[in-house]
Image (cartoon, rainbow, N blue to C red):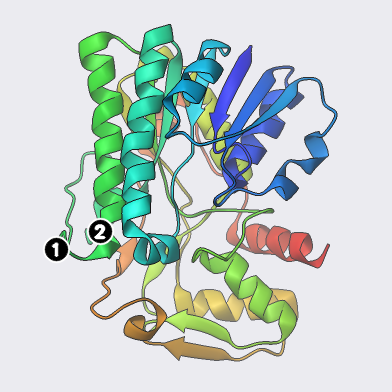
């Protein structure tokens, strides 16, 4: 099988490519390198089963060409990270909405099964215990750039779902909760690689807000495994699935744990949201996934704990 991965030079896309190649598939990696990096896929250079295509998902003719040559589409390309969304909201909206429209439209044209990667940002400020796929979205003003990413990904989900419902395109949607691992950069606001970089340099770990906000983290290897089995499960078509970890931790406790595991002498510094991002910035106080649906259908169960995830990021950055 030949798989198209949009965002194939990205953090998750490159790990998905590795998994597909390891099992004998071919991959075409489409990426404009706006957030993806050639360093993530340099180990694939010379592999006859891996092809890199430099280009944007906004280029309809290019997307048409690569989709026509593949059997399945993994749509991971997106403008990601809080920093990028706040700094370039219009560019992010165009990429996340129009780009997905192009990809899904071409997938339908050629009848290619498609997995669309969405996000836990969908839930907004909903702080319910164990967010399930059917829980309500609670968002702030649409004039706050913080929520533009959530709105855009919601439209992505609607596109994928309605193409399945009205046109019969086999689509699966996955909502990812703080996926972490080697190759991830902290440049766009991803907290664990940013903390690790600061700890290894002996710099203060900068915690935004008061540090009481909590998150759950999941290894990229577990997430990629979930993506693969869901994309190939007929009962998953037309449905959405949470993929994430189960260990909840506050950002202040996370900073202390990174310092300990890195053997660092760094301190912790708290930065107000208005300084870190923009005036009036709103964050989610709590985000914990309920992954029952994925577990019951395909046996999704994260195998790597938080310490293991942090250690893997530390080892990667040290190398």
Placement of 251 over or under 56, stated as above or below: below
Residue identifier under label 2: 147
- Name the residue: 37% across, 33% down: 100
Residue 37 lies left or right of residue 136; in this view the side is right
Q: Is residue 293 visible to the viewer in this orientation of the structure?
A: no
Quarter in which the N terminus is drawn = top right
Mark 2 vs 1, N-terminal side: 1
Residue 200: percent from left, percent from top: 73, 78
Residue at 17% x, 63% y: name it.
143
State which quadrant residue 228 falls in. top right
Label 1 neighbour load within 10 Å: few <14, some 14-19, many 20+: few
Q: Return the residue at label 1.
A: 141
Residue at the spot x=60%, y=91% of the render? 267
Element carrying mark 1: loop
Structural distance between the alpha carbons of marks 2 and 1? 7 Å
Q: Position of residue 82 (x, y in %)?
A: 40, 63
Q: What secondary structure is found at the residue carrying circle 2? A: helix
């Amino acid at each position: 099988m030949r798989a198209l991965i949009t965002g194939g030079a990205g953090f998750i896309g490159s790990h998905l490519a590795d998994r597909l190649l390891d099992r004998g598939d071919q991959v075409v990696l489409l990426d404009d390198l706006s957030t993806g990096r050639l360093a993530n896929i340099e180990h694939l250079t010379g592999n006859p089963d891996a092809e890199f295509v430099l280009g944007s998902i906004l280029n309809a003719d290019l997307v048409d060409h690569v989709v026509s040559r593949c059997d399945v589409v993994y749509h991971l390309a997106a403008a990601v990270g809080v920093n990028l969304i706040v700094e370039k909201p219009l560019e992010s909206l165009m990429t996340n909405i129009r780009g997905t429209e192009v990809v899904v439209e071409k997938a339908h044209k050629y009848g290619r099964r498609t997995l669309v990667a969405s996000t836990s940002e969908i839930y907004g400020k909903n702080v319910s215990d164990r967010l399930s796929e059917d829980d309500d979205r609670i968002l702030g003003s649409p004039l706050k750039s913080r929520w533009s990413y959530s709105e855009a990904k919601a439209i992505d989900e609607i596109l994928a779902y309605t193409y399945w419902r009205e046109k019969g395109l086999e689509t699966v949607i996955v909502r990812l909760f703080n996926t972490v691992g080697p190759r991830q950069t902290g440049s766009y606001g991803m907290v664990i690689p940013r903390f690790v970089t600061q700890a290894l340099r002996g710099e203060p770990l900068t915690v935004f807000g008061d540090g009481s906000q909590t998150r759950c983290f999941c290894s990229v290897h577990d997430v990629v495994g979930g993506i693969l089995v869901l994309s190939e499960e007929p009962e998953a078509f037309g449905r959405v699935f949470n993929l994430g970890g189960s260990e909840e931790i506050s950002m202040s406790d996370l900073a202390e744990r990174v310092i300990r595991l890195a053997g660092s002498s760094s301190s912790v510094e708290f930065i107000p949201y208005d300084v870190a991002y923009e005036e009036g910035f709103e964050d989610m106080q709590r985000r914990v996934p309920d992954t029952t649906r994925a577990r019951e259908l395909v046996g999704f169960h994260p195998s790597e704990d938080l310490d293991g995830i942090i250690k893997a990021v530390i080892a990667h950055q040290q190398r």
